[in-house]
Amino acid sequence: MVGGARESFKCKPGIYEIILKSRKGFVRIALKTGTPIVPVFTFGETDLYDQVPNPPGSWLLWLQERIRRVIGVAPCIPIGRGFFQYSFGLIPRRHVLTTVVGAPIEVPKVEQPSNDLIAEYHKKYVDSLTQLFEDHKEKYVDDPKTAKLVIE
């Protein structure tokens, strides 16, 4: 998962917010190996769980961030469903997941890619991912008129 542990704090039903702007290592590796980058997006993932509210500035988010920095794992408090009831528990809610796969972005093989080259292909990936989301949200999002992909 490109967004890493920080991205899990943003995972809430109906919200499509990913951390990608500062994550460029996967592009560097693709350029070093000459491996195409494939944009992939899964609709419905954020609807499997909710979280205990942790708005910006809250003591809970502050604590979660501190723990994440120390151990590298995001200590989220998920709210799903139970074994015999559907109002609360740790089991994911029942929701359809649909993964859409975009066209591969061909990259050249470059031993030492420059920051400009990395930025160029990263932008192509972000644009492709955004277009993939926009092309398919009508089919797979509960409220496509308000759904938007936020890339942080």
Image: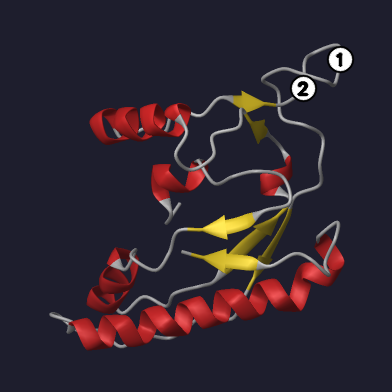
Q: Which residue is rendered at x = 77% and y = 32% of the image? A: 93
Q: Residue 150 falls in which quadrant of the image?
A: bottom right
The image position of residue 149, as x and y in percent, is: 63, 67
Q: Amino acid at mark 2?
A: Arg
Q: Nearer the viewer, residue 54 or 123?
A: 54
Disc 1 and disc 2: Cα gap in Å? Answer: 7 Å
State the colouring used for the structure image. Answer: secondary structure
71 w.r.t. 138: above or below: above
Most extreme residue toward the top is 84
The residue most toward the left is 112
Residue picked out by circle 1 = 85
State if disc 2 and disc 1 touch (CB < 8 Å).
Answer: yes
Could you say whether the residue bearing mark 1 is in a helix, strand or loop? loop
**Residue drawn at the location 31% of the way across and 68% of the way down:** 24
Q: Is residue 86 above or below residue 5?
A: above
Q: Which residue matches tag 2? A: 81
